[in-house]
């Protein structure tokens, strides 16, 4: 039975039917592909995430294929996208769905948010896009549009305030096409009700928008909490001998599972001679010192220096590897290992 559409959802869906961008995950009802796209697009722009989505679907067409993959291969495919815990959660959730849920995703919001890495936003997206459940999505773009349109002044940095936005949206979500409505509202926030210079003159909601009427577009949404960013000085030591180098696999932190060089880390700036003096006594020639390069993570500002040290004939690569708990790799092998983006970028810049 078709239920009556409210004017808000009619306007929004009508706008979307003309303005929407054709993206591969918009033409599927497969919860696996929708979930995949949503995890990839968290903290990532569509243009950047699109090739990753295509590569994942190509390599792992079903949740069982992803579940059976080696974690190292998954991290390798994810390389460069950042926030690697997403890739590890993606793999763990695929194994859970394939192993414990007979390969089927839960078919409603309540079941979906039980999955690892699936929060209220991703749960609502999958529930509405794949199963047409009328539960509103609230991502950054929707927060902004809803805050301005409805005049909601609650701080969006406070998790407890999400409910005010969900409540307002629950009253206008399309009862007939909730999936289309949710796609539309995210697209609208991303392309019309933008952070700076919202396109109010061409906006179909101008006549009923709180922020437009009160000329307070720039004051909304309210976002007060600032993430404290800590600075860290990271010095990577690239030992090289006869076409081989030393790396190790990280087993903790956001780079868990990625390979990196030996490092000297400090909360304070260090001069290169101080770094070199902390290394085990070994016969090497300093070929180059590059950086510092600034690398931003969600909660850290890293200043990264790379020290390229060529070991002399008499040096013992095996003994050094043992002492520093590293393993020996040829440069060909290094290129196949999943690595943090800052290392990938450095190796692309430098020709050994
Ligand atoms: S009128 Fe302006 S502020 Fe209001 S919804 Fe439209 S674009 Fe956003």
Image (spheres, grey):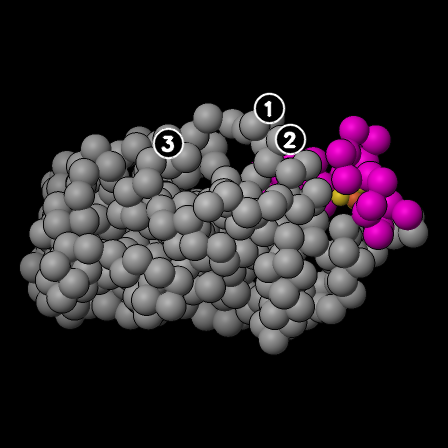
Residue beneath the point at 83% across and 31% down: 201
The answer to if 201 sits in the magenta stretch is yes
Answer few, some or many: residues within 10 Å of disc 3's Cα (few below 14, many 20 plus, some between 14 and 19): few
Hey, which residue is sitting farthest front in the picture?
A: 1
Residue sitting farthest toward the right:
214
Q: Nearer the viewer, residue 163 or 296?
A: 163
Task: Find disc 2 in the rendering and name its residue.
Answer: 15
Q: Which residue is mark 1?
A: 18
Res. 311 visible in picture: no
Badge 2: residue crowd in 10 Å (few <14, some 14–19, many ≥20): some
Was residue 61 drawn as part of the magenta stretch in this picture? no
Left or right, residue 228 beside residue 267: right
The 10 Å Cα crowd at callout 1, few under 14, some 14 to 19, many 20 or more, is few
Residue under numbered circle 3: 27
Q: Are marks 1 and 2 in contact (CB under 8 Å)?
A: yes
Boundaries of the magenta span:
185-213
Secondary structure beneath label 3:
helix
- Assess whether mark 1 and mark 3 are in contact (beta carbons under 8 angstroms): no
């Amino acid at each position: 039975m078709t239920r009556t559409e409210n004017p808000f959802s009619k306007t929004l869906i009508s706008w979307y039917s003309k303005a929407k961008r054709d993206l591969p995950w918009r033409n599927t009802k497969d919860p696996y592909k929708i979930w995949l796209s949503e995890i990839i697009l968290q903290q990532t722009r569509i243009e950047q995430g699109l090739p990753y989505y295509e590569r994942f679907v190509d390599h792992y067409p079903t949740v069982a294929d992803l579940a059976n993959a080696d974690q190292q291969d998954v991290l390798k495919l994810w390389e460069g996208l950042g926030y690697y815990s997403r890739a590890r959660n993606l793999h763990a959730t695929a194994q859970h769905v394939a192993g414990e849920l007979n390969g089927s995703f839960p078919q409603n919001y309540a079941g979906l948010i039980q999955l690892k890495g699936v929060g209220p936003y991703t749960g609502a997206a999958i529930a509405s896009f794949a199963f047409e459940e009328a539960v509103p999505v609230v991502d950054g773009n929707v927060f902004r549009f809803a805050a301005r349109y409805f005049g909601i002044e609650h701080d969006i940095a406070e998790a407890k305030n999400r409910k005010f936005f969900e409540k307002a949206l629950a009253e206008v979500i399309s009862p007939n096409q909730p999936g289309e409505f949710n796609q539309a509202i995210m697209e609208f926030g991303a392309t019309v009700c933008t952070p700076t210079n919202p396109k109010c003159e061409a906006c179909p909601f101008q006549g009923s928008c709180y922020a437009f009427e009160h000329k307070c577009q720039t004051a909304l949404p309210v976002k007060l909490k600032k993430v404290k960013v800590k600075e860290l000085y990271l010095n990577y030591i690239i030992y090289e001998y006869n076409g081989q180098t030393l790396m190790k696999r990280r087993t903790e932190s956001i780079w868990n599972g990625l390979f990196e060089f030996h490092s000297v880390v400090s909360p304070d700036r260090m001069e290169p001679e101080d770094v070199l003096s902390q290394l085990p006594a070994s016969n090497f020639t300093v070929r180059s010192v590059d950086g510092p390069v600034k690398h931003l993570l969600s909660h850290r500002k890293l200043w990264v220096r790379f020290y390229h040290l060529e070991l002399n004939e008499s040096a013992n690569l095996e003994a050094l590897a043992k002492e520093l708990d590293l393993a020996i790799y040829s440069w060909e092998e290094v290129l196949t290992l999943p690595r943090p983006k800052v290392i990938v970028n450095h190796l692309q810049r430098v020709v050994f």
